[in-house]
Image: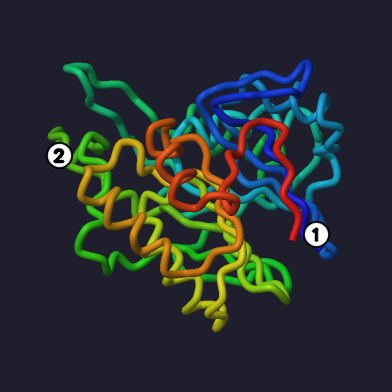
Amino acid sequence: MIKVTVLCENSVFFSEGAVAEHGWSVFIETEQGNLLLDTGQGLGIINNARVLEKDLNTIQGIVLSHHHYDHTGGLRSVLEDIKRKVPVYAHPQLFKESYVTRKGKTRYIGVPYNQALLETLGADFSFGAGAREIMPGVFLTGEVPRLTQYEKGDQDLVVKDNGVFVKDNIIDDQTLVFKTLQGLFVVLGCAHSGIINTLEYARKITGEERIHTVIGGTHLGPASEEQRAESIQALKKYNISRLGVSHCTGLPTSARLAHEFGEKFLYCNVGTVIEV
């Protein structure tokens, strides 16, 4: 059995004492041990873990889906809370300098802390760009091949190249995939690689065609209408049993997915629990 509890997300309902933030983090319980995927901004993860009665000291590893602050900002708080060395699975580009440029403003959105500080606090970084099995039946995709024509990513996310801002293709984007008897349980970070690219690659690296459950950020909120429409149509072909979106999906797109997927749809706010 795999049990996932959402610790950080943009909204919270019916979890008294929990707080919302623009970010994403999930606590994952498995028979092989517990994992933490992402850490939110750091505003709510410690409080919410306690409110939801999830012991961060039990985690055997932390997986970072990509470098953005709303997924990595809570890493310091988690390390300070558990007070021990813990494996942190990440892409080699985790500490790159990246920005968002929107509405005439530019701001830094990378990891808020440097590698040396986090290692001092107990982070045992395990960097890898390729797909790998970090526990039996638990896969980290690494870099996801960009094969679709319509998943073009967010044009407002940039990095500095020789002092000039250029589009950040976010090749460090990766996803956690569990191979179960019912099919794949896919836990997205933001799916910057494109949700269809991600699902296709998850099937390839695991050898499992069936996709049972998909949860997490889809980044379809900031996407173009073409990408949004094409992705939704492609999603409907997978016969997914449960689609639980959150965070960067945005409310209008979430409502659209709820209409398309009906009873198979759920919104993953703080406190949501999903079991496979």
- What amino acid is at disc 1? Thr
The residue located at (56%, 48%) in the rendering is: 265
Give the answer, above or below, for where 74 lies relative to 139: above
Question: If the image is split into quadrants, where does the N terminus sit?
Answer: bottom right
Residue that numbered label 2 is attached to: 162
Q: Is residue 33 left or right of residue 268?
A: right
Residue 136 against residue 246 in the figure, above or below: below
- Residue at image mark 1: 30
Residue 274, horizontal then vertical, whole percent: 72, 49
Give the quarter of the image for residue 210: bottom right
Q: Is residue 206 left or right of residue 110?
A: right
| C-alpha gap between disc 1 and disc 2 | 45 Å
| Mark 1, other Cα within 10 Å: few <14 / some 14–19 / many ≥20 | some
**Rendered position, 134 above or below 110:** below
Q: Residue at x 66, y 72 (%)?
A: 179
Quarter of the picture containing the C terminus is: bottom right
Query: Observer-nearest residue: 39 or 267?
Result: 267
Q: Amino acid at mark 2?
A: Asn
- Secondary structure of residue under mark 2: loop
Which of the two residues, 58 or 268, is positioned nearer the viewer here?
A: 268
| Residue 44, picture quadrant | top right
Q: What colour scheme does the image use?
A: rainbow
Query: In terms of secondary structure, where does tag 1 sit?
Result: strand
Left or right of 108? Residue 218 is right
Task: Farthest residue to the bottom: give it.
Answer: 207
